[in-house]
Image (cartoon, helix red, strand yellow):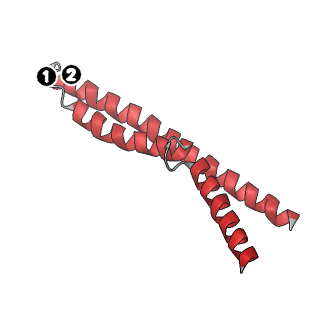
Amino acid sequence: MEDMDKENKYLKAKERVEEIKKFYTSLVSYVIVISLLAAINYYLDQWQYMWFLWAAFGWGIGLIFQAAKTFGLNPFFGRDWEERKIKEFMKEDEHKQRWE
């Protein structure tokens, strides 16, 4: 039983590390691609119309959502909320079973 608990903790930690790694890979890609688009934009029209900002904005929104998911930044439905709800439902079930 203890070995399974350690294995589950290891798998959860490994999954978390993979999520963080994916986020940082996306962040580096974002910086490189947006920088390249900005350079192209400047080269073509000296930023008379900064069209690269549309790509930066759109991709940036996706990156913000990915960061929120990866680091549990959602104040309403974050990881802590999940754990609290699971414990709450487990207590309710335990309480119901006592009275049946």
**Residue 51 position (above or below residue 67):** above
Q: In front here: 61 or 86?
A: 86
Which quadrant of the rendered structure holds the N terminus? bottom right
Question: Which residue is tagged 1?
Answer: 45
* 44 on left or right of 62: left
Residue 58 seen anywhere in this rendered image of the structure = yes
Q: Amino acid at mark 2?
A: Tyr
In the drawing, what numbered circle is on residue 16? Answer: none
Q: CA distance from mark 2 to mark 1?
A: 6 Å
Q: Locate residue 89, reporting x and y percent.
A: 63, 64
Which residue is situated farthest in the front direction here? 99
Q: Locate residue 25, reporting x and y percent.
A: 50, 41
Q: Quadrant of residue 2?
A: bottom right
**Residue 37 position (above or below residue 83):** above
Q: Amino acid at mark 1?
A: Asp
Q: Locate residue 3, reporting x and y percent.
A: 85, 64
Q: Kindly identify the residue that appears in the image at 23 percent across and 31 percent down.
A: 52
Q: Kindly identify the residue that appears in the image at 75 percent across and 56 percent down.
A: 9
Q: In front here: 72 or 40?
A: 72
Q: Residues within 10 Å of mark 1 (few under 14, many from 20)?
A: few
Question: Which residue is tagged 2?
Answer: 42
Residue 21 seen anywhere in this rendered image of the structure = no
Q: Residues within 10 Å of mark 2 (few under 14, many from 20)?
A: some
**Residue 60 position (above or below residue 17):** above
Marks 2 and 1 close (CB-CB < 8 Å):
yes
For mark 2, give the secondary structure: helix
Q: Kindly identify the residue that appears in the image at 54 percent across and 48 percent down.
A: 78
